[in-house]
Image (cartoon, grey):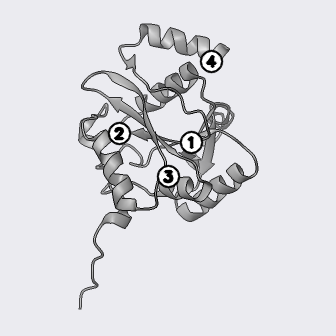
């Protein structure tokens, strides 16, 4: 109740407009992209609280140190060690299979820094759990944010990513220069070792 009230006040006074398809009716992996600014976090909470979505999100361990730890966990944070991404996926899959039901927010383009490709954890989590993927977005050009379509991934990485790329093609983050093209490393051609 308090979260919904806070969200209502936020959207009333925000310069951003919430435009969203209906909230997913089943557990989902929520992609947050393009992730180019810390403001994305505030917008994500505003979306989730307004639409009544119980969310958890993955964050680097350093965000959970000291006094920030309890606050971040209360806001739905799950600390992860990015040096071992396979373990991160395994832990999240185990948590979901234990009976926990929630929307898992993932920012596959990384840490607001213009990487060469998206991280594939969201894809592996969705495929291993059978959860769909909901495309959350920020678009500075129109000052809109919200949720786009929910997709069931097929396992055909290229075809699935083509749909995701098409959705994000016209979305511009808060800091456009930090945008990462929605492309997974698995889609890149293999490079033969030099002889």
Measure how far apart labels 3 and 4 are at the Cα level: 26 Å
Task: Give me the disc on residue 3.
Answer: 4
Cβ atoms under marks 4 and 2 closer than 8 Å: no
Mark earlier in primary sequence (1, 2): 1
Task: Give me the disc on residue 28.
Answer: 1
Q: Is residue 93 visible?
A: yes
Measure how far apart labels 4 and 1 are at the Cα level: 20 Å
> Percent position (x, y) of residue 58?
56, 45
Residue of label 2: 34
> Percent position (x, y) of residue 142?
27, 22
Mark earlier in primary sequence (3, 4): 4
Q: Is mark 2 on a helix, strand or loop?
A: loop
Quadrant that contains the N terminus: top right
Residue of label 3: 122
Mark earlier in primary sequence (4, 1): 4
> Percent position (x, y) of residue 63?
56, 41
Q: Foreground: 14 or 82?
A: 14
């Amino acid at each position: 109740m308090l979260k919904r009230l806070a969200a209502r006040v936020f959207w009333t006074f925000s310069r951003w407009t919430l435009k969203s398809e209906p909230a997913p009716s089943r557990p989902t992996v929520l992609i947050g992209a393009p992730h180019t600014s810390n403001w994305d976090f505030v917008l994500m909470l505003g979306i989730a609280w307004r639409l009544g979505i119980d969310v958890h999100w993955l964050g680097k361990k350093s965000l959970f140190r000291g006094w920030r730890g309890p606050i971040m966990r209360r806001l739905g944070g799950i600390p992860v060690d990015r040096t071992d991404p396979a373990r991160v996926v395994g832990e999240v899959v185990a948590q979901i299979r234990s009976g926990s039901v929630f929307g898992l927010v993932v920012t596959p383009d990384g840490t607001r820094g213009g990487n060469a490709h998206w991280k594939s954890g969201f894809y592996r989590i969705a495929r291993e759990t059978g959860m769909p993927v909901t495309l959350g977005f920020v678009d500075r050009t129109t000052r809109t944010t919200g949720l786009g379509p929910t997709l069931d991934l097929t396992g055909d990485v290229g075809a699935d990513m083509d749909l995701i790329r098409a959705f994000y093609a016209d979305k511009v983050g808060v800091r456009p220069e930090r945008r990462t093209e929605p492309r997974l490393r698995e889609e890149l051609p293999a490079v033969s070792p030099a002889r």
